[in-house]
Image (spheres, helix red, strand yellow):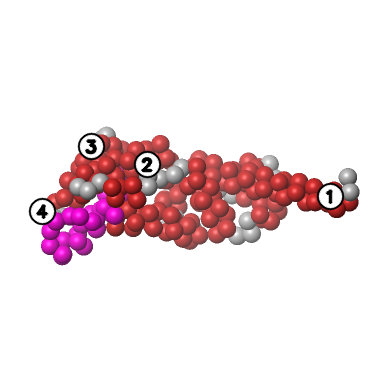
Amino acid sequence: MKKGNQREYQLKERAQQQAETRRRIVEAVVALHEEVGPARTTVVEIAERARVSRPTVYSHFPDERSLMTACSGHWLVANPRPDPAAWRDIDNPRTRLRVALEQLYAYYAPRERMLANVLRDAALLPSLAEALQYTIGSYVQTAADILGTGWEGRPRDRRKRLAALRLALHFHTWQTLTRSGGLSNEEAAGLMARLVSECVA
């Protein structure tokens, strides 16, 4: 093998190793966030889970913000949310909302532990709160805008309707209705859809 080709091969191999190490670190963090929560996850635990040294963790993620951003993106790719754009095709706003809530609540159920942990710890970790604003916050805003169109009623009803929509879309609303309230996902979706409808009655 010529020197140029050998060096190119070595650089490529090193890049692959770096990518693999980064992947292991991110997956370790995601697993720990689900198990104990972001606030209780330490660099020592991350390094042990990823089978790397602490300096290696810091070399890939020099600060908490970069780590939170990477983990949030990784988790969302593995757990894609219902696409709000698909709800635009449903003309009737009440039917559209009911379908959207049933899909979203079905999404929340198997991911409850992770979502509960990150939302709980966001108050303790500014970098996590920032990451959630770009993910959950923007998603809820987009969904509320789409689901808020097509309703009858006075213009002043819009403010109440949007507030009710954001409440209906929130993870904690689903958790309260299903875990504390004992409702099924379908029952919870129907209840919140009726609540939003009352805002334009």
> In this view of the protein, can residue 121 be seen by the observer?
yes
Pointer 4 or 1: first along the chain:
1
Q: Amino acid at mark 2?
A: Tyr
Choose between 34 and 20: the one closer to the eye: 20
Pointers 2 and 3 in contact (C-beta within 8 Å): no
- Residue furthest right as drawn: 2
Mark 1 secondary-structure assignment: helix
Q: In the figure, is residue 95 to the left or right of 73? A: left
- For image coordinates 23% across by 56% down, the residue present is 149
How far, Cα to Cα, is label 3 from label 1? Answer: 63 Å
- For image coordinates 37% across by 45% down, the residue present is 82
- The label shown at residue 201 is 4
How far, Cα to Cα, is label 4 from label 1? Answer: 73 Å
Q: Amino acid at mark 1?
A: Asn
Pointer 3 or 1: first along the chain:
1
Q: Amino acid at mark 3?
A: Glu
> In this view of the protein, can residue 173 be seen by the observer?
no
How far, Cα to Cα, is label 2 from label 3? Answer: 15 Å
Q: Quadrant of the N terminus?
A: top right
Question: Is 149 in the magenta?
Answer: yes
Pointer 2 or 3: first along the chain:
2
Residue 195 percent coordinates (x, y)? 18, 49
Mark 3 secondary-structure assignment: helix
Q: Amino acid at mark 4?
A: Ala
- Residue topped by disc 1: 5
How far, Cα to Cα, is label 2 from label 4? Answer: 29 Å
Pointers 4 and 1 in contact (C-beta within 8 Å): no
Choose between 142 and 173: the one closer to the eye: 142
- Residue topped by disc 2: 108
Pointer 2 or 4: first along the chain:
2
- Graded by Cα atoms within 10 Å as few (under 14), some (14 to 19) or many (20 or more), the crowding at tag 3 reads some
Q: In the figure, is residue 190 to the left or right of 64? A: left
